[in-house]
Image (cartoon, rainbow, N blue to C red):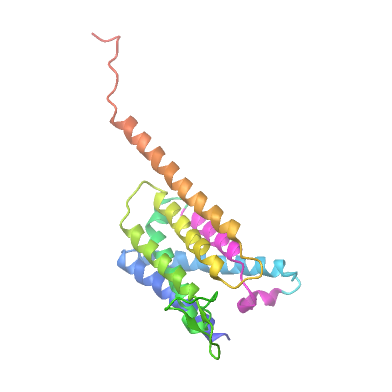
């Protein structure tokens, strides 16, 4: 078993649980764990297919998480499960958004247990080098963890119409990855298009939902026109 991977996952779970407790939403813990499990499964399947491995022929390879998990597949799977589970009351998505970002922050901070925090070379004073190397590197995963933690805190200060906070959480998660992706070691540059789309959809959705709610409120406050047929 990959114990460092387990430790990183537990760091994310602890962050998720703590924020849910602080917000008085502890009963939602099971829902979010379910979303994480579905996302992990979906992301692993996408990674296997992308690598040319047939999940139907090699079903037990799904359990080898360290073999790779697609960020896109995991995100889509988690979001789909959350939306389905909260379909009767979409306010739940807004309520748990800070906790979701805190959980993601904990996962990225879990790089400390895995030794996977570092990215591109840097001369900045807070960079550090791999063991046996003299090249200082950006602690890129910690950058992402800080951005996500700040986003979680900011969402606790925002109270907007239904759907706005969840949309902003999507934009924050995608934006944190978009900003840090250039510093990650990658042969392909990573799915930058996916993160950019998440930012656009999240911000656009927040603006649209806020505007719709404002227009509805304005109509509700507008006095009724007098009935010309009455004396």
Front residue (pair 185, 82): 185
Q: Is residue 155 magenta?
A: no
Of the 4 image quadrants, the one containing the N terminus is: bottom right
Front residue (pair 36, 167): 167
Q: Residue at x 61, y 71 (%)?
A: 69
Q: Going by the picture, which residue comes out furthest to the front?
A: 123
Front residue (pair 211, 57): 211
User: Residue 169: x and y, percent?
Assistant: 43, 57
Q: Residue at x 43, y 73 (%)?
A: 106
How many numbered marks, from 0 up?
Answer: 0
Q: Residue at x 32, y 32 (%)?
A: 218
Q: Going by the picture, which residue comes out furthest to the left?
A: 231
Provide the residue span drawn in magenta. 59-86
Residue 222 lies left or right of residue 136; in this view the side is left
Residue 10 lies left or right of residue 2; in this view the side is left
User: Residue 98: x and y, percent?
Assistant: 38, 62
Above or below, 114 relative to 93: below
Q: Quadrant of residue 77?
A: bottom right
What secondary structure do most residues of the magenta stretch adopt?
helix
Front residue (pair 84, 168): 168
Q: Is residue 7 visible?
A: no
Q: Residue at x 50, y 62 (%)?
A: 179
User: Residue 92: x and y, percent?
Assistant: 40, 55
User: Residue 173: x and y, percent?
Assistant: 47, 61
Q: Is residue 198 visible?
A: yes
Q: Quadrant of residue 101?
A: bottom left
Q: Is residue 72 magenta?
A: yes
Above or below, 201 relative to 153: above
């Amino acid at each position: 078993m990959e114990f460092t991977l387990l430790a990183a996952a537990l760091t994310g779970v602890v962050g998720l649980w703590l924020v849910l407790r602080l917000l008085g939403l502890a009963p939602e813990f099971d829902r979010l764990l379910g979303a994480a499990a579905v996302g992990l499964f979906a992301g692993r399947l996408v990674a296997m297919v992308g690598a040319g491995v047939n999940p139907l022929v090699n079903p037990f390879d799904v359990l080898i998480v360290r073999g790779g998990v697609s960020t896109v597949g995991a995100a889509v799977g988690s979001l789909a499960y959350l939306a389905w589970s909260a379909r009767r009351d979409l306010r739940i998505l807004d309520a748990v958004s800070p906790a979701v970002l805190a959980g993601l922050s904990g996962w990225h901070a879990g790089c400390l247990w895995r030794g996977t925090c570092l990215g591109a070379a840097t001369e900045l004073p807070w960079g550090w080098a791999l063991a046996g190397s003299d090249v200082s590197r950006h602690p890129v995963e910690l950058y992402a963890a800080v951005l996500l933690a700040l986003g979680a805190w900011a969402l606790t200060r925002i109270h907007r119409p239904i759907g706005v906070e969840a949309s902003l959480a999507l934009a924050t998660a995608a934006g944190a990855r978009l900003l840090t992706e250039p510093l990650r070691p990658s042969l392909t540059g990573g799915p930058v298009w996916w993160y950019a789309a998440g930012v656009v959809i999240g911000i656009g959705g927040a603006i649209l939902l806020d505007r719709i709610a404002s227009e509805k409120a304005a109509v509700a406050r507008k006095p009724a026109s007098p009935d010309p047929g009455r004396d």
